[in-house]
Amino acid sequence: MKIIPHDDEYTHVIPPSLYVGIWATLMVLTLITVLASFAELGIFNIVLALLIATIKGTLVVLFFMHLRYSPKLTMVAVIASVCFLLILFSLTMTDYLSRHWATFPGR
Amino acid sequence: MATAVQPVVERENYLNSNYGIKSWLLTTDHKRIALLYLMSITAMFWLGGFFAMLIRLELLTPAGDLVTSDTYNKLFTMHGITMIFFFLIPSVPAVIGNFVIPLMIGAKDLAFPRLNLASWYIYMLGAGLALWGFLLGGVDTGWTFYTPFSTSYSNTHVVTVAVGVFIVGFSSIFTGLNFIVTIHRMRAPGLTWNRLPLFCWSNYAASLIMVLGTPVVAITLLLVAFERLFHIGVFNPQLGGDPLLFQHLFWFYSHPAVYIMILPGMGVISEVVTCYSRKRAFGYEFIALASIAIAVLGFLVWAHHMFVAGISMYSALVFSLLTYFVAIPSAVKVFNWTATMYKGSVRFDTPMLYAWGFIGLFTMGGLTGVFLASLGVDVHVTDTYFVVAHFHYVMVGGMVLAYLAGLHFWWPKITGRMYPEPPAKLSALLVFVGFNLTFFPQFILGYMGMPRRYHAYPPEFQVLNVLSTAGASVLAIGYILPMIYFLWSLRYGEDAGPNPWNAVGLEWMTPSPPPTHNFDETPVVTWEAYDYEHQPQEEITIGH
Amino acid sequence: MATSSEIQTAERSFQHHFASIEQQRDTATFGMWMFLLTEIMFFGGLFCSYLVYRRTYYEAFVEGSQKMNIILGAVNTAVLICSSLSMAMGVRAAQTGKPKLMVILLLVTILFGFGFLGIKAVEYHEHWVNHEFPGPNFHFETGDPAHPATDPLHTQIYFGLYWSMTGLHALHMIIGIGLVTWLVLAGMRGAFSPIYYSPVENVGLYWHFVDLVWIYLFPLLYLISHKHSG
């Protein structure tokens, strides 16, 4: 019958303890982000901040959003769109980063 | 045998299953939604054509004597906005794709039928708002909305029209989303990816672009609106904002957008060329992968629209190189279509005439794109009529011809009627001749230095401009005739039968017009795509 | 095993162009993921602008960022993370056939959502009365006489991005609260069961995504540098 689903890996039920564990990790990482911002690390401030944000984001996506337990196609799609976002950033930056490289007579 | 008399008892199909305006405005049937879109985009096509007519009339004489320069700015802006956002982008996907894709994959409907209807309503809302902006006085920024003119200096209805375009972008996004999910999840049993018709591959690739690219232009136009309304000056040079940032964000979508426009058209050509050559597609996998390659590579080249805008020379070099690469998969397709026809049993019905026109004209347009990719050449011909001719060759000579090919090819399936072949062939000829007469002189004009977006020009350019306007008149007739004979065919056209072209494909295995639920039972596919070798002359039945 | 009433409610929600309820469920979830990818690109345009201008006008951005209340920002981040927990647990409750628990957890999620918006409103009010909204009334001072504003013109761009990015995010929160409210109402009418809980799962995905955007917004807007702060 079309209505009764067959149990498959995609109806995986996650134990509450895992959710609470992820939540606790996210809270701790938030605290670390704030504290780390007070350290004077120069260029590494932003690197560290983005790194921690990405770890937090990955945990949210994998566990709260169940990507870990979803079809591979979904994972491919998420990674692909992140790649296109990075293309937007990086190719745009080829312009801004190289604007002052060349000087011409009269400029 | 041909008969102009209605059958006594009409079989139930998607057209007669329900009557009344509510059954159309609240439909979730992808076939009816496709027809709703057909009405809307045809109306917008004529509006865009009206603006084009005024432009060409102005350009008959060197002096700017028909309209003021401000009005002329509005004309080319509204022509571009209407044709690109409200006609070309939805044309093949929303009309032909909506109708044919579920049939081609053996599904009862798209994955999200209600979202499909919402897409049309969103389109109508966006179109309504843009039209309202046009009626209030129009917009003069160019369809490209370049800042700071659009944000700080233009006194026209930028926000109204930009928000209209923003809204219609969501129509495109939802259509693309629907197609991607449908093609992944709703294929009939046995329909593997390498049995999928190339029309589906092309629309899938175009849908990837719709989903990934359109949101960026959406936020960019929103920022333009924010700047005009709330003075949030992200692009305002007086605050240190960079107008080039607008251009980067705008073209990140708008370049891939041209592939949104052409890929579905290429899909139509794949279907038409195989059917009228009675051969399987040469290099099926290459054509399929070329579609994906065009979609991906298309995202890497956008700043070739900005070579002289002020980007760094090094960045320009990178984009120039990448732009050469994106020509390759398109060329692969042209070679493969040609090879498909080689030693095929070629018939020249109207769809095939348009396909031949497409292959020739798209090649010319595409090659001139390669000229523009070269920095040295681009410095001379950018912002001239050379560019105008280039993009009209690909968008009109390519895309519009492909759309007409598709309309003719699937008209029997959509309506159950055959269009009359003689006037159709005449129209195809008029479109081809009219098109070339309109736009070929523009390559020469651009090379000689006539700038675009100017309503006055030096007198030595007049002869070519007059030729161009004459061509546009012929082209217009070529467009009007199908309106007439398609409507004529609804009442007097020959009964089409399920497969008038003897084509291979699931959509040809249902009655014409199809029943609302498409297939009585879900077909099981056991044959390869374009299996013309094994296609007997008589109609094949489902499941064999 | 599914009860007959669960089967009945699932049957009402089953759409007949699908071959099975699993196909409907997997398709709906895939569709929501596709939509979220468009949202990534939508916010992505703003992040790209932020990237370009932060690099070019770093000092101006640092000074603008000093005006952000780090405590309120951090609390808001915590609020959203808690709301994601309650949302995820709410989806799980629907998945395991506990409709009453689901409704309670979704109500908790809504409460957290309003908490976030309330704190945001307080922050916006502060910025507004301090003339930190771009436009003719924009007026920026560091508030520290020893360190006058280096680059007030470009700080206006920082604030333009701040208001656009957080404003758009807040709009998405409001829509999210609306969606979760709809789930609560439907849930109270018994619309969901272990056989059919797709809407809960998919609104959950949307909610977590909105949280995800804030996870990036917070360090980028609030925590640029504390060089000039006490």
Image (tube, coloured by chain):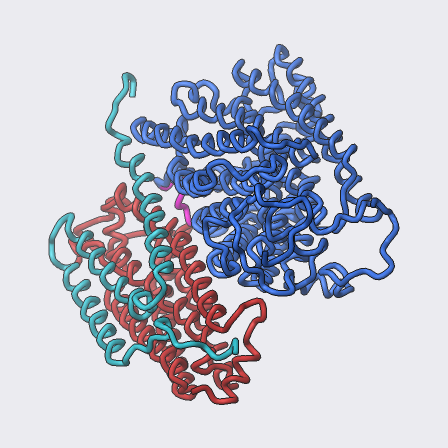
Q: Which chain is blue?
A: B
**C210 or B62: nearer the viewer:** C210
Q: Quadrant of the C terminus of chain B?
A: bottom right
Residue C191, position as x, y percentages in the image: 51, 82
In the displayed structure image, the side of residue B125 where residue A57 appears, left or right: left
Residue B344, position as x, y percentages in the image: 59, 32
Image position of B391 with respect to B507: above or below: above
**Looking at the image, which residue is at 76% across and 63% down?**
B12
In the displayed structure image, the side of residue C187 where residue A50 appears, left or right: left
Toward the left, the furthest residue is A40
Range covered by the magenta-colored residues: B232-239
Q: Quadrant of residue C66?
A: bottom left
Q: Which chain is red?
A: C
Q: Quadrant of the N terminus of chain B?
A: top right
Q: Which chain is cyan?
A: A
Residue B25, position as x, y percentages in the image: 69, 62
**Looking at the image, which residue is at 57% across and 48% down?**
B93
**Looking at the image, which residue is at 71% across and 27% down?**
B429
- Residue B169 belongs to the span the image colors magenta: no
